[in-house]
Each structure stands twice: as C-alpha cells, then as structure tokens.
Amino acid sequence: MIKTRLLLPALAALLAAALLFAGCGGSDSSSSDLAGFAAPGSLVYIEGKLQPSGELKSNVDSLAQAVGGIDNLGNYIVAKLEDSARGKGEPFDYAKEVEPWLGEKAGVSFKGLKDGKLTEPVIVVESTDVAAAQKFVDAQAAQSKVPYKDASYEGVDFKVGGSDGNAIGVIEESLVMAEDGESGFKAAVDASNGESLADEARFQDAISAASAGSLADAYVDVGGLIDASGNGIDPQAKEILENAGVDPSEATAVASVVPGSDQVEIDLSSDLGGEEAPSGDASALIGSLPADSFVALGSSGFGDQIKEAVDKLDEEGIPGQVPPNQLKSSLSSIGIDLDKIATSLEDAAVFAEGSSKSSLGGALVLTSSSGEAAETVANLGVLLRRTGAPGVTAVTSGGASGFSVRTAELGKKPLVVVAKGKRVAIGYGLAPALQGLSTEGETLSDVASYKAAVSALGDTPLSGFVDGPGALSLAEALVPPSETGFQEAKRYLKSIEYIAIGTGSDGELATAKLIVGVAE
C-alpha cells in the first residue's frame, strides 16, 4: 500500500494536472470552500478539480493527445503513480485505495516562505465517503515501517509520524495532510473552526476576480511574499512599480487556467496595490513588425515611463559626471529636449528574429506622435561624431538616418540607432534596425500563427507573441545535443503553434491572458 509520504507528491501531481489543463466546466471557480482549512495569512493557495467530466474531460484529453500522445490523462497519471510506488517497494492500487473516497476538488495552501521556498503546506482533498477516507488513513499508519502515533485536537483524531513526520486525518468531510506535522494539522483544525484564509477580505476580493467556470485557481499574496522574503524585491524593480502607482507590498494576484480543445489559457488578475491599473494598446505596432520575428513584445504609454525615469535621473544626477538637476539643462543647450521627446513617445515594441546564433538579431522600435524623436537621433549622432566618440559612424539608408556604435563588448555587430518619420529603432545590427522602421512588405499581421494568436485573445489587446516553430528552431540550433532534458522536451514543444500574451484592465485590476495554441 502507498505510504503517506507518497500521498503528497501524488496529490501534487493531480493538482498540477488540474492547473495545466483546468477548464470551463460547470463549476464556479470563485467558490473556495477548501480555503476554509487554510490558515489566515497563507501566502499561496491553489485549488483544482481532480476528476473532470463532460466537455472539460474532452478538452483535457484532446490536449493530452496533441501534446503527449496520451489518450486519457487521468489514467496516465494514475499509472505513473502506481509504477513509482511499485519501484519504491510500496505497491499502490489507486482504484481500491483512493478512488472510493476521492472527491471532486483538492486544495493546497502554503503558510510561510523560507530560503526562497514555500513552506508549511497543507493539502485538503474532498471526500465522498468519510468512512473510506478514514480507513485509508488508518491503513497508512498501520503499514508504515516508521511508526505513527495517535493524536487528537479539538475533538479531531489524526495520525502523526511516518518517515517524514507528516500529520494526516479527516476533518469534517475532507482528508487533510500537513507536511510539517502536528502543528500544521492543528492549524487546519483551527481554521475550519474559526478564522481562515477564506474569511479574509483581501482573499475574497482577489478570488472573486477568478475566471468564471475555471477548474483551477491559484491565489498569491504578493505583498506577503515580499515581506516573508525580507523585502527581497529588486530596488530598481520596486522603484519602477512605485513610479507606475503600484505598491507591491499591498498587491495580490489570482491565476485561473482554462483549457480548450486546442489551447490552454491562463487568466491573471491583480489589484497591484495601486489606484489605477495601467492601460493601452500596442498591438498595432507589434503587428507591423517583421514577419519572420519569432518573438515580439510591446508596451503602450512608453513615453510616460521614460519621463518618470528621466525626471528622477535629472533630480539625482550621475555621480562623477552630471550634477543633480543639470542633465536636462545640459542636453537642452545642445538642442536635445528630453521632456519634449518623452512626451512625444507613444508605444514601444521589441522583436527578435533568426534561426541560429549567427543570424540572431532584433530591435527595439518606438513610435512617436511627432518627428521630435527622429530629429533627436540625428542630432545625437552628429554630437557623438563631433566629440570623437570611438566606434561611432553615421547611418543613412532608405530615408533613415542615425548612427551606429561598434565596440569589442558588442561583438561582430554594431548597435544601430536610426529614425524615419515617426519611428525610432535601436537594433543589434543594421538590417534588423532598418526592418523595425519599415511598415512595407510582409509583417507579423500577415502570418497565420499571429492571426490565430490575435483571434484567441478576442477583445484583449495583444502585448506579446511567440511563434512556436520559430522559437523551437532557434533553440535547437543553440542547445547542444548533450542537453538530454531539452531533447526530451522537444516532443512536447513541437506541438506549440504560438504563445499569445494579452494585457488590459478592469477598473482597478490589471488583467492578463496567456494562451498557448496547440497544433493538432
């Protein structure tokens, strides 16, 4: 019989499957009854459906077949668990030992964080037969090579011990297992009898934004994780968030996983701890990028971000080079108005192309509401050449103007900064920089996989795109054959047609979608 120490990975595998292929069944994802067993202040809570049926099961099996050639994902997972248990000398019969009591949903909560890892996990599994679940618990204790002891707390009997010192028992109508032993189980009992994560307003507000009908949801207390890590957020990242009106110490997030027959969708929402969620649409710029781009990412409102960064840099100065409050005035004296440039900038996007290390290239592309940015590029090129900056040469090609910089650190290709009309491109190499300026010829908006990505996102503006075959082709060229992990993963990666990322807002919530399109 499977030992208790195998129950945690077994249920974790089932939950992982739910998170990977969760979907649009008839359940209400905002319902989180099992969160009533999670201690208040839990940092992470995940809940998933273990036994899909109907359209959900059909979608799960369709995806499993397309990705891994697996006809029935549930049966496949069970077979793997039984094989693993058998290999450890602990035979396990799922149909006899677990299936008779296994309910529809399971949840896992994590109370703490230590050395970057979530701790104090408590797993809760709904039971359809309390007596059968209790029989399972008793059998684990009786057949364990390392003794268990009987314990009781607030009228709830449970077992503590085994090779890993876990605690396991039945609370109300659910099987509960605490990896950190007696204290964790008692915390689950206390939560079920009194205050729990489910009672906290921040959890309720966050989970209410989970996608309706999803099968698996994950709640994250972002601020709690930051506090538990000793405020271990990169200072620059924190500054960027705060400049955008985001207080990460107050943020929470919820992710919901929704499958279709040919795609997996992850919906994310976060209050960000700010007053207003960012908005904008850079999809038009992304769609105008070169057709052979294997990845493209975009952002709207780039000028506002640049202005905030420039204001702070001007205020603080550059140690040893520019005194505080002198940067803007110094550049203005030579015809470069940073405020005017920042105000004129609108969207930004970056793309990468190539199928080998030698052909790899890309560029950052900026759009402007006027020709101010383009004029600045020309002025900056002239200035650098006049000052005798090493490696700087003028660039004039096809109506574009700018400059390039060559250094040993950059390698064989120069960094090229060019502008034309209302576009500026900063590229690694001349060709991708000029491609970034051009809106003629075939673009991403003409590519079938890009069209499919845009269609899958619906009304959500696209902010990121990855072409599956193109990205895999480059990876195959860069990853050595000796990397067996990648070679094994290729059979699954080949099924990815595209990855689409969309971002938006809903009131004070920032929202995002990540959709992985799977080829049949």
Image (cartoon, rainbow, N blue to C red):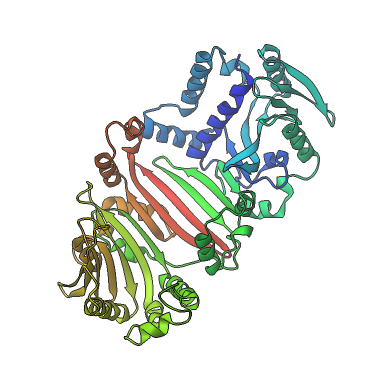
- Extreme-right residue of the structure: 155
- Extreme-bottom residue of the structure: 333
Dividing the picture into quadrants, the one containing residue 290 is bottom left
Seen at 22% across and 46% down, the residue is: 356
Asked if 407 appears above or below 108 in the picture, the reply is below
Task: Give coordinates of residue 155: x percent, y percent.
Answer: 84, 29
Left or right: where 361 falls relative to 265 = left
Task: Give coordinates of residue 282: x percent, y percent.
Answer: 38, 65
Q: Nearer the viewer, residue 394 or 299?
A: 394
Asked if 473 appears above or below 236 in the picture, the reply is above
Q: How many marks?
A: 0
Seen at 74% across and 49% down, the residue is: 199
Dividing the picture into quadrants, the one containing residue 176 is top right
Asked if 445 appears above or below 24 in the picture, the reply is below
Quadrant in the picture for the C terminus: top left
Seen at 40% across and 59% down, the residue is: 463
Task: Give coordinates of residue 273: x percent, y percent.
Answer: 61, 62
Left or right: where 160 falls relative to 517 = right
Q: Nearer the viewer, residue 281 or 374?
A: 374
